[in-house]
Image (cartoon, grey):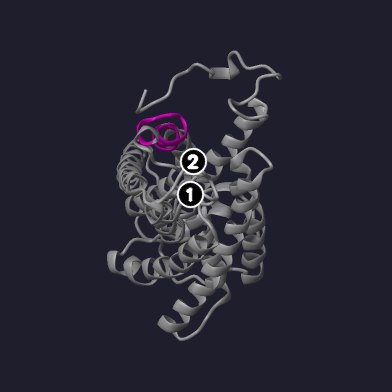
Amino acid sequence: HGIIGNLQYLFMNGVTSNTLHPSTTVPEFIYAGFQLAFAAIAVALVSGSLIERLKFSAWLVIVPLWISFVYVPVAHWVWGGGWLAKLGAVDFAGGIVIHITAGFGGLAGALVLGKRKNTQLVPNNVAYTVLGAGLLWFGWFGFNAGSELAADGIASSAWLVTNTAGAIAAISWMITEWKIHGKPTTLGIASGAIAGLAGITPASGYVNIMGAMVIGILAGVLPVLAVSWLKPKLGYDDALDVFGVHGVASFFGVILTGVFADPSINPSEKGILYGNSHLLIAQIIASISTMIYAFVVSFIIFKIVDVMMGIRIRKEEEIEGLDSVAHGEAVY
């Protein structure tokens, strides 16, 4: 079905240890675990928009609802032979499925929750931020190159352009931030790297180095504008800038896949620079439709849970901190 999948493989029905994922040498169990990691990453990203003010009990309700009604349908649209796949849209490693859904889903949640009591908190530990960014950067190689499901030329190219886009975006963000705020920051460089990695994710198995560099440059500029200008103008409180970094970067990364897809890298696709305008049109439709769907359905989910049980902690609890209030623990 073009909109939703089916229950054919529920509880691994019909899948054995000898079952391979179609057209690969990868066992279906391994592929399922790989996809599970993608789903977990997506909803974890959403939580980044909501930290410091969301009830833990409400989050436990939101997670299965969001996975079921936002992530899974979009994954089917793109990777399960759904309507976007039939339209011709492509997403090599999750730009549409993970980063656009999480970015705009997080924005919806932030709007429903409202602002934190104190939005001027500085990062607790910049050194840990850099360490975390480095771990993410390294892990992204498996994220993107691994999506080829084979050790071949496309996977090696995906690894190379992933690294390139992350590096270029880190530099691009640094320069843009320097120009706007007068100083480059370590946090900005780390954010730029993540934005570049998110931006290249949908394109990683299709574009060459030059395409990756253009995506990296834009992924280092547009998210800065979203975080520095759009966020205060619209007044939302996306605590970890999931929308600005992941949503914005990947939204344009998906579209630019339709521009730079190089048939010498991956013969299955070619962009408008190589004489095919259809892919660009399909990518634009995929980006916009996923953006609208993820935002609207996420907004509805957050609103319903809010009406049912309330999703925001009390002000005095926010002052004390969720580690103590919800779990009786202290991280620092």
For residue 250, above or below residue 83: below
Can residue 72 be found in the magenta stretch? yes
Query: Between residues 293 and 49, which one lies in front from this camera angle?
Result: 293
Residue at screen point 49% across, 48% down: 263
Residue 259 sits in quarter? bottom left
Query: Foreground mark, 2 or 1?
Result: 2
Q: Residue furthest right?
A: 17
Q: Which mark is residue 202?
A: 1
For residue 279, above or below residue 212: above
Q: Secondary structure at mark 2?
A: loop
Q: Is residue 119 left or right of residue 320?
A: left
Whether pointer 2 and pointer 1 mark residues with C-beta atoms closer than 8 Å, the reply is no
Residue 15 sits in quarter? top right
- Residue flagged by tag 2: what amino acid is it? Ser
Tell me the magenta residue range. Answer: 69-84
Residue at screen point 66% across, 62% down: 134
Residue 126 in sight: yes
- The percent position of residue 233, horizontal first and vertical second, equals 28, 69
Q: Which mark is residue 247?
A: none
Quadrant containing the C terminus in the rendered view: bottom right
Q: Which residue is mark 2?
A: 268
How dense is the environment of label 2, judged by Cα within 10 Å: few (below 14), some, or many (20 and up)? few
